[in-house]
Amino acid sequence: MTSIEDICKEKLLIERNLKACNFFVQAVAKEIGLANSLFSGRADDIVTRMRSACPPIVFLDANPSAATSYAEDGYFVVGGLESTGMARASTSGHVFVVVPGGPSESGLDTPWGYPSRGGQPYCYHGSLSSRLQTRERLQVDFIFSRVDEGNVVYAAVKDPRKQSSTKLSSNSYLLKMMGGVAVG
């Protein structure tokens, strides 16, 4: 099974996803088999849906440690901030996909001209801003200013590919226990 991080790298090869955070998140979600309705619309719509915590979404609030932990456990984790929550006026929010490997390092150069603060999840994203367009894994504090970083919220959804493979494994085990032949 392809990792969520590898899917992120693949989806960022598509120019549309590189230049639009919502299209990127939607493309990754679709690839792993999540319903389009969970991550449809603009970034603001996605973050509003994350906050609703309607199943299967687990809302993690502004908790970067929980986001990293869920990503490490194989969940599809999305972070974001609505346009109304940003310190500088914006017409659009921003969303991104959290991947395993955090917390991030401190003291690295950021696009904002100050060193990274560290302690944040690693992520992939699309961006309208050409200076933030990259196909590389980033730290969340590379994307958001110091003021905005604390307002970023996270949500997790179980990777449906793992749910179905777990059921198949359980069914195969039961068949073996009952003397049947397991397929797959």
Image (cartoon, rainbow, N blue to C red):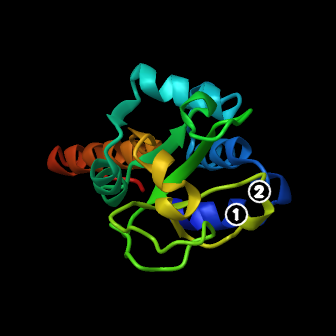
Residue drawn where x is 30% and y is 55% of the image: 73
Q: Position of residue 172 (x, y in %)?
A: 29, 49
Which of the 4 image quadrants contains residue 138?
bottom right
Q: Position of residue 170 (x, y in %)?
A: 25, 45
- Mark 2 Cα shell of 10 Å, populated few (<14), some (14-19), many (≥20): few
Q: Does 131 sit left or right of 177 as displayed?
A: right
Q: Label 1, on which residue?
A: 132
Q: Secondary structure at mark 2?
A: loop
Q: Position of residue 179 (x, y in %)?
A: 19, 48
Q: Nearer the viewer, residue 158 or 152?
A: 152
Residue drawn where x is 70% and y is 69% of the image: 134
Residue 1 in sight here? no
Q: Label 2, on which residue?
A: 129
Residue drawn where x is 32% and y is 50% of the image: 70
Q: Secondary structure at mark 1?
A: helix
Q: CA distance from mark 2 to mark 1?
A: 5 Å
Q: Does 108 sit left or right of 33 as displayed?
A: left
Residue 18 in sight here? yes
Amino acid beneath label 2:
Ser
Residue situated furthest right in the rendering? 15
Amino acid beneath label 1:
Leu
Q: Nearer the viewer, residue 17 or 160?
A: 17
Question: CB of mark 2 within 8 Å of CB of mark 1?
Answer: yes
Q: Position of residue 54 (x, y in %)?
A: 41, 19
Q: Does 157 sit left or right of 40 as displayed?
A: left
Which of the 4 image quadrants contains residue 81?
top right
- Mark 1 Cα shell of 10 Å, populated few (<14), some (14-19), many (≥20): some
In the image, residue 8 above or below residue 32:
below
In the image, residue 38 above or below residue 105:
above
